[in-house]
Amino acid sequence: MATRYLLDWWVCLQFQDGNYCCSNKAVHSSTSDRISDLPSNVIENILMCLPIRDAVRITILSKTWRHRWADVPQVVFDDTFLRNSREVIEGSTTHELLMKTVYEVLLLHFGPIHKFVLSISGLKSCPEIDRLILFLSTKGIQDFTLDFSSEYPAYHKLPSYLFTCLQLRYLKLCSCIFKPPPSFNGFSKLISIQFQGVHFDAEFLKDFISNCPLLERLKLHSCVEISCLEINAPNLKLLHYISAYKCICFKNAPLLAELSIYESSFGEPDSDKRKLFNLIEVFSCLPAIEYLSVDYYFLKDLAVPDSSMRLQTTLNHLKFLKMLELSYAEVEEVSPALCLIRSSPNLQKLEIRMYCRHNDGRNPFLQLSEWDGFLDFSLNQLQEVKLQGFHGTRPELEFVKLLLAKSSALKSDAY
């Protein structure tokens, strides 16, 4: 009974939304079964909002719903799939039973599958997963998630079948080995990539990105074998990168608006072999940047162009700037940070997580009187400043003094 009330409420919302030409009066006055008479797209939307167990169970409400779950183009196997039994996948027997259940559900599905998610705690690499991918490659898959997010995952080598899924638009992989066949020419329709703990060949990534011309979102977390992060993606709008790197090159990213780059100890390369980036070269290739979040590794690798602390390219679109683990006792970190702030006249929000490093006197810090090239500017749009890890040291106080003097529109500050 509760389920019927829930459905009635959901249906009323659909009609009130104006998507269907039917008045409430007509619905309530009808003597027919309202559930059975629902439009096909409404039934499909209801079933897509439910976990697959509930989608199967709810079909007993109406004969016309009997096999509709098997035609829904979205199939999700996540931790909610096991919520009734409260099983934890431990041992081969339980895991084999899980994979058998997943495979049987797919065999009963007779329609296209546009979205498929396999993300269950404790999921292990096994041959059955390759057979699932082979099956999905014949179903017009557009959105694919495979997540082995256990504490000590065994990396699963993806079969060649995945690289025949040329309709893919969203791809999310965790703890996989991504090595396409030599004949692979990229996913021409892919718009979003999310890789975590994915292994690929050292020079593969840059070619893969350039062979996905519609790519708009790229997230890479703890991926290995990336020597140089080279971005050639004319439609890319978001890049989140948390991994080791030796060099970074934004070859073609005119639309990139959100950029986050953090060094990761996972697979960290030799720091002596890291390449310094020219601050001008990096940001002259990012004319549309609006959100920037970096750590002190990135700042230390940036070569400040000159003593005036200026960029030739003004970051007119940058609204949010976040810098992590920044030490005001280190000139090599402070200089590029100040250069970024100085070159962002429309900055609205600034966040800095400070790190208090001991200054033994050999590494001088910048004093306000020494910032001659940094004083001829204003931050008239800056409204919010957040400083985490503030210790009240002399260079920190100098920086706060500067911000207060240059930010006439400042509404909120936190330390």
Image: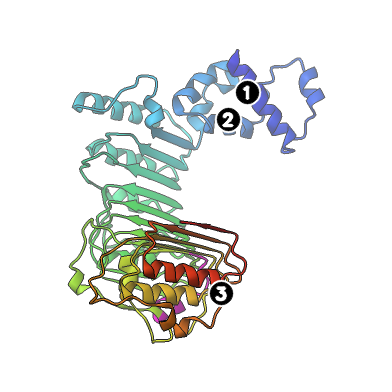
Q: Earlier in the sequence, mark 3 or mark 1?
A: 1
How many C-alpha atoms fall within 10 Å of the one at disc 1: few (<14), some, or many (≥20)? some
Amino acid found under the numbered disc labelled 2: Ile
Image position of 73 with respect to 312: above or below: above
Residue on which the image places disc 2: 46
- Name the image quarter holding residue 33: top right
The C terminus, quarter of image: bottom left
- Name the image quarter holding residue 248: bottom left
Q: Secondary structure at mark 2?
A: helix
Label 3 to label 2, Cα distance in Å?
48 Å
Label 2 to label 1, Cα distance in Å?
8 Å
Q: Nearer the viewer, mark 3 or mark 1?
A: 3
Residue on which the image places disc 3: 345
Residue on which the image places disc 1: 7
Residue 173 pos. (x, y %) = 34, 48
The part of the chain drawn in magenta is 280-291
Residue 368 pos. (x, y %) = 43, 78
Instruction: Please indicate whether residue 42 sits to the left or right of residue 123 in the image.
Output: right
Image position of 391 with respect to 74: above or below: below
Q: Nearer the viewer, residue 413 or 221?
A: 413
Image position of 94 with respect to 185: above or below: above
Residue 375 pos. (x, y %) = 50, 81
Amino acid found under the numbered disc labelled 3: Pro
Q: Nearer the viewer, mark 3 or mark 2?
A: 3
How many C-alpha atoms fall within 10 Å of the one at disc 2: few (<14), some, or many (≥20)? some
Q: Nearer the viewer, residue 160 or 283?
A: 283
Q: Residue at x 27, y 66 (%)?
A: 245
